[in-house]
Amino acid sequence: MKKYIARNPVFLILVMLCCSLLYNLWPHNRAVLQSVFFKEVVRTKYIYTRPPSWSSGLPVIFAITPTYSRPVQKAELTRLANTFLHVPNLHWIVVEDSKNTSTLVSHLLQSTGLNYTHLHVETPLKFKVTGGKKPNPPRGTLQRNLALQWLRQTFSVNDSHPGVVYFADDDNTYSLQLFEEMRFTTKVSVWPVAFVGGLPYESPKVNSSGKVYGWRVIIDPQRPFAIDMAGFAVNLKLILTKPQARFKLTGVKGGYQESSLLTDLVSLSDLEPKASNCTKVLVWHTRTQTPILRKNITGLADFIGEI
């Protein structure tokens, strides 16, 4: 019978015509036909609120994002905000590299409905990028340190709510699972990061006992903590009890910014591997392509102020 049907397209056409007639002429048959041929899904409520309800028993994630003015700044921050809107108990600390907070970033933060703190500190000109070279120190150093300072001024060691600090740059893509993995960090948790260091991913090396013993990287693997900024989170109390811990502004080689902070906080044996013992990627260093824009086009630049 199956061979007969496959070799006789006329028969198939007749079957389809009969189904069509049944569907249109006998309404009570529609439900039966629908259940056979397709499934309709109707959402009766939103999957999440905006932002998620605050839970007093859940540790807070303090996401620190340094940012600077550029054509894709608003796009990057918007994408990041849309991710954070799905994360319960998240406080976003945005630090601009500027003399003042900008209207663009202020408006964006206000529109999200997220819990946030908006700070600013300008990187001295001598440390900024010139001639296409990398900044020295790396971009975001002063901004991340200011966020750490704000945390220490806002919370005391004894009175602070349980929390975790994460350096969430605005040019990354984050899985929602990542935030639940880091939420209950005891000291410092770590995981792989994709598209960094010239590799598909970089990752801590984890032994059979679940302990980190090294780094799966090709660029300077002898670094104390050869890890990307997006690859670790720190318990808030550890930040508060170690006031000297910060990113070093000078005297630090490229790629050592993470180590300059972490060496003041923990040793290698203290690290807590997440993401299934560092076998899964939950964050990607994607970056937004810089657009090629025409300048001085009359009637366009002045029509929409914030892009």
Image: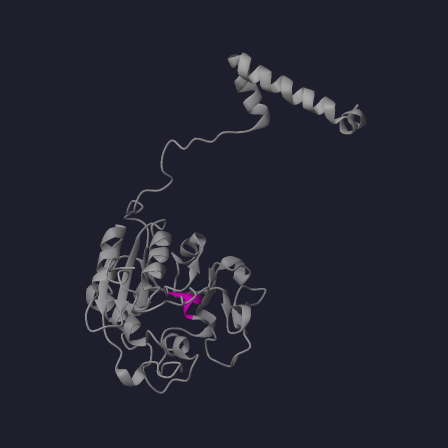
Residue occupying the point 31% across, 46% down: 52
What residue range appears in magenta?
229-234
Residue 200 location, quadrant: bottom right
Q: Is residue 206 above or below residue 84?
A: below
Q: Compared to 55, does 10 lie above or below? A: above
The one nearer the camera, 150 or 83, is: 83
The image's colouring method is: one colour
Does the image show residue 140?
yes
Q: Residue 263, image x and y in percent?
A: 39, 77
- Residue 135 is inside the magenta segment: no
Q: Is residue 159 among what the camera can see?
A: no
Q: Is residue 140 left or right of residue 3?
A: left
Q: Nearer the viewer, residue 131 or 212?
A: 131
Does residue 139 sit above or below 93 in this rendering?
Answer: below
- Quadrant, the N terminus: top right
Place residue 143 in its image quadrant.
bottom left
